Structure formats: C-alpha cells, structure tokens
Amino acid sequence: MAVAAIEAHRWTREEYEQMAEAGLFAPEARVELVEGIVYDRLSQTPAHVTSVHLAEEALRLAFPGRYFRIQFPLALGSHSEPEPDVAVVPGGPRDYPDSHPSTALLVVEVADSSLLHDRKRKLPLYAAAGIAEVWILDLKRRALEVYRDPVSDAYRSKTVLPAGDAVSPLAGAGVSIAVADLLP
C-alpha cells in the first residue's frame, strides 16, 4: 500500500497578517510566524522582562540615535515574521508605516524556556536574512551567546560569554557592554 506524503500548510506573511486583522488570534495572543508556522510565544517571566529592558538600556549607549523595536515583528522573507525581544533596525519609526523592517543591525533574544526555539528555529532564519549579529541571552546559564558572520542559514562565529565578560556590538559605537549588565 502506497503512503502519501502529507505536508503541513505553511502560511505566508500576507496570510498571517490577514488572519491577525480578521481577529483569528485573540487580542492577547502572543504568536509569531517562523518559516510558515504560527508558534505561540511563551509567557514572560519577571527575569525575562527585566533582561529585555536591561538589554535595551545598554544598547541605547552603543547605538545612539538608532531605532529600537522591542518585541515587534521583522519581515524576514515571505513566510516569516518573528518578534525578537530587541532589534536595532535602520531608520526610524516613520520609515515603516506600511511594512515591518526586513533587516536589523542586531537582534537580541532573551531565553529562559525558549532557548531551543531561539537556537533551532529563529537563529537560522536570522542568518538566512543576513542579519550580521544575533545575541541569545541565556538566563539559566547566565551567559551571552554571540553569533556573527551569517552564511546561508547559519553563523560561522559563535562565542559564549559568561557574566564576567563584556561584548561590543559590531555595528555599535565602540561601546563595551558587560554581560552582567544584561542579566537580572
């Protein structure tokens, strides 16, 4: 007996946005589109929220006058609209009245229970979009994973920095940020 391969339907960004506008997601729903699949975003612990604010605060010194998007979508290809915790994007708010940014200078994901999702699903997406630098702040290990040099759907460079180290964003103003300053 032949077995047919049954594929899951992969949503486009356009279909996803139409579903949101039509109210198919509850107003309080926290979802994001990654490679055509709508994923529930995990609830935010107090430590997660604190780290998002600390990262934004620290990065404002490294990227003076830049536009920050906090948990807002990036339009990455026709099937993905992830919502990174922090994204430093080109331009300003008025540059995006009709569409979300399609790139970022730096993306930061704060991970406690979402670490596997961030590494396995979102990181390859960011690399494929050519985002030069991604940070994953691992709250459980109290470390910062720094990914640089995207090629295809991966990063050639990965550095893990413990809380006692510091990092300077590639596209930043040469400011050094202590990893401990990003942690709750």
Image (cartoon, helix red, strand yellow):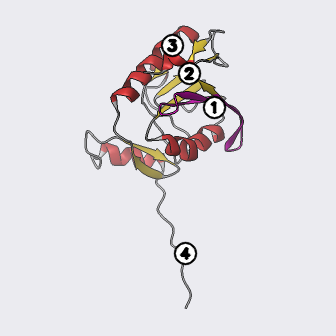
- Residue contact between numbered discs 1 and 2, judged by CB atoms under 8 Å: no
Q: Main secondary structure of the magenta part?
A: strand
Mark with earlier residue (2, 4): 4
Please name the residue that numbered disc 2 is placed on. 163
Please name the residue that numbered disc 4 is placed on. 5
- Which marked residue is nearer to the observer: mark 1 or mark 2? 2
**Quarter of the figure with the N terminus:** bottom right
Magenta part of the protein: which range?
A: 134-160
- Which marked residue is nearer to the observer: mark 3 or mark 1? 3
Give the residue at x 57% y 27%: 144
Give the residue at x 52% y 45%: 116
Does 162 lie within the magenta span? Answer: no
Residue 67 visible to an observer of this rendering: no
Quarter assignment of residue 154: top right
Disc 3 from disc 4: Cα separation: 49 Å
Mark with earlier residue (1, 4): 4
Decide: few, some or many residues near mark 2? Use Cα within 10 Å; few <14, some 14-19, many ≥20.
some
Q: Position of residue 106 (x, y in %)?
A: 58, 25
Q: Nearer the viewer, residue 13 or 143?
A: 143
Q: Amino acid at mark 2?
A: Ala
Q: Position of residue 85 (x, y in %)?
A: 45, 29
Mark with earlier residue (3, 2): 3
- Which marked residue is nearer to the observer: mark 3 or mark 2? 2
- Residue contact between numbered discs 1 and 4, judged by CB atoms under 8 Å: no
Secondary structure at numbered mark 2: loop
